[in-house]
Amino acid sequence: MRKLAIFVSVLAFLVPGRPWVAAQSQPQAPANSAEQQAFLREFNDACSQTQDAMLLTKDELKDLVRRCDALVPRLTKLDDTQRKVYKRRLEQCRGLFAYVLDTKKDSDK
Amino acid sequence: MLLCGIFLAVTMIQGQQVFLQAVPPEDQFGDVTLNQRVTPDNGPVVFNHWLHRSKFTCRVCHVDVGFAMMANGTGISAKTNQEGFYCGACHDGKRQFGNVTMFGSCRLDGVAKTDSTCSRCHLSSKTTRKYSYKEFTAKLPKARYGVDWMAAENTGMVKPIDIVEGISIPKERIRNRTELAIRPQVEWFTGIHFSHELHSKWNSCELCHPDIFPTQKDRPASITMYQIANGRFCGACHVKVAFPVNGCNQCHANGPRWVSGPGWVM
């Protein structure tokens, strides 16, 4: 029995590719659940407009700030590292919309 | 009299901090040392900005990938790299840029993890850098301090990638780029013509606003050279990675008012 266990262990190490190790080392897909994919879709859609922020109206900017705020609680659905990355990206994106909105409000005064 | 002396001494010391900053050698300018979790086998990671900026815009790494603007401020670890974030976002052992396949950072599969792979980033006695600054930059145009990256891009010698598939949100370039004339705080010096167009070539709005440059009401009424030299405002990039602020005329193109024209150099 003991010999069999040793044989199986040795055989396992000789299997080419060692699939369990490879699986562990594969980079995780950025989104591996429906909730994560939905988060990323909304994030990409809202934050794709940062380059045009100066051309947006105040109402459009307010809406984008609101959409970013709505994404904050959904960060908890992400994996640890993904949450850290997207928390920062979301802060940058929301911060810019709020910045442009403030700038536009100031220039109206 | 004593008070005047103290005031003068403090001003001179501050002045030295502003204008006589020690700038590292060209090949080390912009290097970032990441010394988290250093072990006898894994020395600190010394990241070369000069190599990466020749391949990618600032925006890709500091917005899309999510690297902080401060050394050791991101929280990079072997785990985050293995999960495909931070260094691992590109260095995954698969992604290709041009004809080059990125080496995998911090891989666990026993294939990529060899001493030589680890030591490509983690400095040790076994480290031999694949790229040498001197050879890599030999043909690139030079500015007063190191490579003139803007000229290198304008002449097509470097072509920084701005969108990385699977990481970046495809966006158009900034369309509304206002130019700013910044008035000097002192009468004897000329102002700055700040070009949003030039700065947005490699950056995006959210990289600078609001973190580095907040709204008027959230920032001091004036920006001083002392603040810049200490890494705030323009100094967030220009003290550490982009050209250093030791030469006045790179921003104040016309120099002090008693000298006319852009030929002034300090």
Image (cartoon, coloured by chain):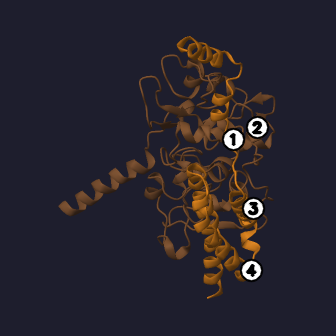
Chain colours: A orange, B brown
Q: Nearer the viewer, mark 3 or mark 2?
A: 3
The residue carrying mark 4 is A57
Q: Which quadrant of the figure has residue A78?
A: bottom right
Callouts 4 and 2 close, C-beta under 8 Å: no
Query: What's the amino acid at mark 2?
Result: Val
Q: Which quadrant of the figure has residue A22?
A: top right
Bin the neighbour count of mark 1 within 10 Å (Cα to Cα): few under 14, some 14-19, many 20 and up: many
> Label 1 is found on which chain of the structure?
B
Q: Nearer the viewer, mark 1 or mark 4?
A: 4
The residue carrying mark 2 is B158
Point out the residue furthest to the left here. B2
Callouts 2 and 1 close, C-beta under 8 Å: yes
The residue carrying mark 1 is B149
Q: Earlier in the sequence, mark 2 or mark 1?
A: 1
Q: Secondary structure at mark 3?
A: helix
Bin the neighbour count of mark 3 within 10 Å (Cα to Cα): few under 14, some 14-19, many 20 and up: few
Callouts 1 and 3 close, C-beta under 8 Å: no
Mark 3 → mark 2, Cα distance in angstroms: 33 Å
Point out the residue furthest to the top here. A3
Looking at this view, is B189 or A54 the one in front? A54
Residue B18 picture location, percent across and down: 43, 51
Q: Secondary structure at mark 1?
A: helix
Bin the neighbour count of mark 4 within 10 Å (Cα to Cα): few under 14, some 14-19, many 20 and up: few
The answer to whether residue B51 is seen in the rendering is no
**Residue beneath the point at 58% across and 63% down:** A91
Q: From what the image shows, is residue B82 above or below residue B190? A: above
The residue carrying mark 3 is A41
